[in-house]
Amino acid sequence: MSFNSILTNWYQANKRDLPWRKSKKPYNIWLSEIILQQTQVKQGLPYYEAFISNFPTLKDLANASENEVLKIWQGLGYYSRARNLHFSAKYINDHLEGVFPKNYKELLQLKGVGDYTASAIASICYEESIAAVDGNVYRVLGRYFGIDTPINSTHGIKQFKTLATSLLPVSNLGDYNQAVMEFGARQCKPQSPVCTECPLNKNCQAYATGSVKFLPVKLKKNKVKKKYFNFIVISLKGNKTYLEQRTKKGIWQQLYQFPMIETEKPIDLEGLLAHSDAQSVIPESYDELLLFNEIDIVHKLSHQELHIKFWILKTSIQMKKAIKWSDIKYYPVPIVLERFINNFQN
């Protein structure tokens, strides 16, 4: 039995019952693929269900406000995915008359859709003969064929795409692509793969040579950068506070936050007040300014490690655009701020 036949048979017997697999509607598949970028199925599933519940059709998503979209996405991270999702929904609705792109090349024109996502949608929804290569596929192919080319190198990306393409069956393209990905997620796992019960183990090069734990090979990333964020939580009369929107490119773009001073190292109250940004962030007149958390809250991202302090500033001054604490729930905020808000108010 061929490589693709073994995997397709395994998939039919072992695939998870996931809501986006109940149909081949491109909107549902696209939504699931965007959510599952950089996100495991267990974490992404409730977000998919929330999106389908709030925006059952592409038109519903296109007509939503960006704040509504970001609020539902809150906590999932990599917020550019949500902004790109919303942008593409509006583009399809307004410029393509609501008709979803129907092939790989057209799908690539959507913001936030790259080679893998376009390949997955094209094969699953339209049976286009194109290989979808994600981290799971890299792992299955790397181990089975004993390939030690780094998967995040230019040569490696081309090599694996070419190999994956050569293995495509003549029919059931969507099922096959999903089979390889599912196999990598559940059988040929990153840690503790189930090799002794693997239907591919007779011809698996990594299993034969004892190199399973070393494959696939990935070049090391740059060192994670530490940053120090000091959020000034302004407590106003009338049970109000103040939020600002992050409009610059970078993490948490378009999300809301308390006014913030970023420093190069940990800072105390004296250093905070002496900082060059203090004048624009901290009101001239206040009653009290106290540190909420003595120990930094460490929030780890893929390329950054944030060390966070929350400073509570009480003042009786009036501030334009102040909001009620009870209204914060309507604003999309980073998950680390949501946790603070819940803790602070309880």
Image (cartoon, rainbow, N blue to C red):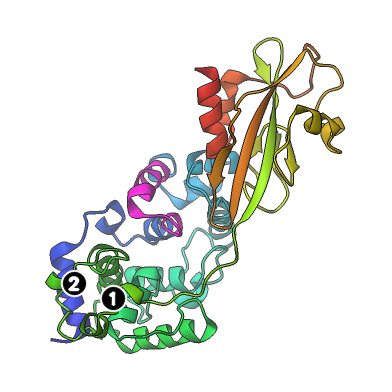
**One can see residue 102 in this view:** no
Residue 333 quadrant: top right
Is the C-beta separation of discs 1 and 2 under 8 Å? yes
Of residues 67 and 146, the one nearer the viewer is 146
Is residue 42 inside the magenta stretch?
yes
- Image coordinates of residue 278 in percent, x first then y, are 83, 32
Q: Which residue is mark 1?
A: 212
Look at the magenta stretch and give its main secondary structure. Answer: helix
* Magenta extent: 34-51
Q: Quadrant of the N terminus?
A: bottom left
In the drawing, does residue 209 fall left or right of residue 262?
left
**Spatial distance from mark 1 to mark 2, Cα to Cα?**
9 Å
Residue at (38%, 80%) from the top-left corner? 130
Residue 188 quadrant: bottom left
Residue at (35%, 77%) from the top-left corner? 215
Q: Which residue is mark 2?
A: 195
Numbered disc 2: secondary structure = helix
Residue at (45%, 58%) from the top-left corner? 38
- Image coordinates of residue 266 in percent, x first then y, are 70, 39
Q: Amino acid at mark 2?
A: Cys
